[in-house]
Image (cartoon, grey):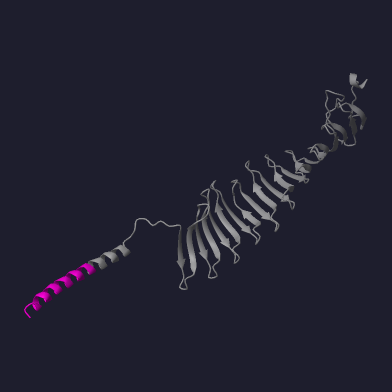
Amino acid sequence: MKKLPLLVIVFSFLGGMCAQVMMQTTALTARNIFEIQDEVVAREFRLVDDDGRTRVSLRMRADNSPSLNFIDTEGKTRMTLRLWSDSSPSLNFLDDRSNIRSTLRLWGTGSPSLTFLNKKGSIMAQLGPGEKGLPTLELGHAEGAIRAQLAVGENGVPALSLNDRNGITRTKLSLTSKDQPFLALYDENRTIRSSIELSEGASPRLTISDASGRLRSALHMWPDGSPALGLFDADGRLRGSFGSTVLDTSRAWASDKTAESSLVLFDAEGHVIVASGKKDSLHIAAPTKEQD
């Protein structure tokens, strides 16, 4: 009976020690749980809703580019904020079939662009300097080709291009470097076949070229209003002219320009072989040795 108090004292002491250790361990564990970490490393972070569905994910893509994705209740990505492999950022909007329908991107050159796409991923409209850094508005076709483009070139000249179903420019309306209007018509090989322009003196000119792009015919009006039609051979030499014609005074003619009713034909060397017009405006010089 005398040993009982001693046992009570020993067990009481041991119990107190255990309780203290447990309290310290619990406090240490709680402190570790709520302690702010300096660094967290992971390949993906996900946020879930009350039903456990992932609604936001921050992850690394297969090309080692980061992506922040917003997901609807059906598990489909509807918006992504991405940094591409060239470090250019983009914001993408997707439809309910996860097709990108609109993209806002800042290219590696620092030029922004806004793009609208159809369900097949074809560009329907694109606005902005884009990858080339030039102000541009492009309109596309459902099959994928760009059909119209309004742009300002590197030299500051505006131009409107109309393309065929293959994306080849067939018509182009622009201003020249001297701010004169210019209209060009192209064939399927991107060769200019016809053009209309105004010169600096506001004189209109219509040209027609062959499949190689060589000028074969030109209709123009001089600043004084007199018209002229010129016909050229495959080497670009003038072979026939109807209307007011400026002649080379070093060759067969001594006048500055013929009358509107004049018809002049030249040989391959540029010498006159046939001429008709007002007598007071045409003066035939002595034949050269080549003409004898």
Q: Is residue 20 magenta?
A: yes
- Point out residue 182 in the picture as x, y percentages from the top left corner: 73, 44
Whether residue 245 sits left or right of residue 90 in the image: it is right
Question: Per the image, is 154 magenta?
Answer: no
* Residue at 65% across, 48% down: 151
Q: Which residues are magenta?
A: 1-22
Q: Is residue 179 left or right of residue 226?
A: left
Q: Would you place residue 78 above or below residue 173 in this image?
A: below
Q: Is residue 288 visible?
A: no
Residue 235 screen position, x and y as percent? 82, 31
Count the marks: how many? 0
Task: Look at the picture and state if 138 lies above or below 273.
Answer: below
Task: Identify which residue, 279 or 229, lies in the foreground.
Answer: 229
**Which residue shows up at 34% across the image and 58% down it?**
37
Task: Say which quadrant the N terminus sits in.
Answer: bottom left
The picture quadrant where one finds residue 204 is top right
